[in-house]
Image: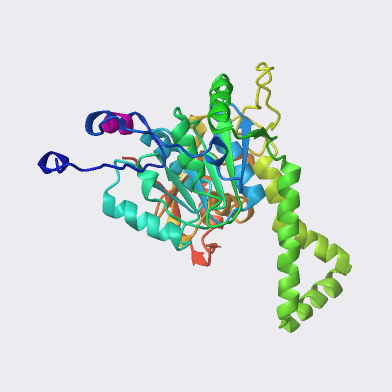
Amino acid sequence: MILGKIDHPFQTVLFSATIPDAMKNIIKKFLNNPQIVRVLREGITAKEVKQSYFLVKNSDKVEALTRIIDTYTPKLTVIFCNTKRSVDDLYEKLIEKGYNCDKIHGDIKQTQRLDTLNKFNNGVIDILIATDVAARGIDVDDIDIVFNYDLPQDEEYYIHRIGRTGRAGKSGKAFTFVVGKEIYKLKDIMRHTNAKISREKLPSSGDIEQVKHNAFIEEIKNTLYKGQLTKYINLAETIISENDITAMDLASALLKMSLFEEVKEEYSDFDVEYSYEKESERFKSPKQKTDKSGKKLTDKNMVRIFINIGKSDGVRAKDIVGALANEGGLSGKSIGNVDIYNDFTFVDIPKKEAHDTIKRMKSTRIKNKKVNLEIAKKK
C-alpha cells in the first residue's frame, strides 16, 4: 500500500459522497483518530428532485414502470435494480415491449459498459438499467427520472441513486417501488435523509390516453405548420367524395386508427389500484388466449413462426401484433408470446391458422421492410 511506504508524518483527508461499510473499514484501518465532518441533513438529497413512491405488487412492477414512463415520457431514465439477475430480467421484458434501453452490471465487460454509457449520454438509448456498483460511472446532466425498481437496502445507496437526477440546477424525479413490508424500510430512508417521499397513484389508462392525445395534437399542429400537404388534401377529398362521408368521419377514423385503440388494448387489463392495507385486492390475471370462435387455446393448439425482422430494424412487439392482426387476419386474443431478437422474431400463433396467415402476409411490410414468415424449425 502507498500509505505504508511513507516514512514521515503526514495528514490524511478522505472525501466520500457516501460512507458504506466498506468505507468505514478503510477509515478504521488507515486513519488515526479521525474527525468526521458531515453535511447538514437537509442537504443530503437535492431539493430539485421530487421524490415519490408507489405501492405495487412484485409481479406488477413491469406494468407499473411502463405506465409511468409512458405518462411522463422522460428524455433519459435510469432504473436501479438490486441484483444483476433483476437487471437482466427487466432488460429482456422492456426490450420485448419495444422500449429503447440497455443495461450495465458487474458481469458486463468494462469496455461494453463504457460504450453503453456513451450511448446513453448521447441519447442513442433513453433508458439505462443498472446495479448500484456499475452505476458509479453515470455522470449525465439530463436524466429526467430515476427509478428505484428495487428498494435499496442501504440508505446511502438511495442517496447515491437519486443524485443521478436533478443535477446542474435542473429539476428531476425519483420514483420508488415499494412492495409489502418494504414500507418500513422506506420510512427508515425518509428519517435518514430527512426528505419527504410522498405516495402517488399509478397512472390509469385514461391518464396515458390523455398524454398520447396531447402529443398527437402537437404532432398534427407541427405537420400543418410545415405545410406541403397538397397531395394529401387531394387524397382526402377523393376518399370523402367516393365514399360519401364527411371530413369529420374521415378525421375520426384516422384518429382511432392512429391512437386510441392502441392505448386501450395495451393497458385495459391492468388494475392500478393497489392497497398495502388491503392485500386481498388482486390485479387481474392475463386473459386466456382464444381463437376466433372463442375456444380456449393451449400450447398444443399453437405453433411458433419465424419472422425476418427484429430489434435492429426498430420493430416493437405492437408492430408485430398489429401486422398479424391487420394483414394476417388473426384475432389479437389468439396471438401468444412475441420474442424479439436482434435480427429476427418468434411469435406463437394458432396452429390451424398458421398456413393462411403466412399466405396473407407474403407482401406485408413492417417498418418499411418486406417480411418473410415461416414455421420455425425445432431445435
Looking at the image, residue 292 sits to the left or right of residue 244; the answer is: left
Q: Position of residue 139 (x, y in %)?
A: 43, 54
Image: 118 above or below 50: below
Magenta residues, dominant SS class: helix
Q: Residue shown at 68%/44% (left/top)? A: 265
Looking at the image, residue 155 sits to the left or right of residue 221; the answer is: left
Q: Quadrant of residue 183?
A: top right
- 95 magenta-colored: no
Image: 319 above or below 87: below
Q: Residue shown at 74%/68% (left/top)? A: 220
Q: Position of residue 25 (x, y in %)?
A: 28, 29
Q: Quadrant of residue 86?
A: top left
Would residue 330 be seen by someone viewing this image from the given angle? no
User: In the rendered view, how is the structure colored?
Assistant: rainbow
Looking at the image, residue 57 sits to the left or right of residue 221; the answer is: left
Q: Residue shown at 42%/33% (left/top)? A: 82
Quadrant in which the N terminus appears: top left
Q: Position of residue 33 (x, y in %)?
A: 29, 29
Image: magenta residue range? 23-27
Q: Nearer the viewer, residue 161 or 56?
A: 161
Looking at the image, residue 187 sits to the left or right of residue 230; the answer is: left
Q: Position of residue 356 (x, y in %)?
A: 55, 50
Q: Nearer the viewer, residue 248 or 214?
A: 214
Image: 219 above or below 345: below
Q: Quadrant of residue 235?
A: bottom right
Quadrant in which the C terminus appears: top left
Image label count = 0
Would residue 324 be seen by someone viewing this image from the given angle? yes
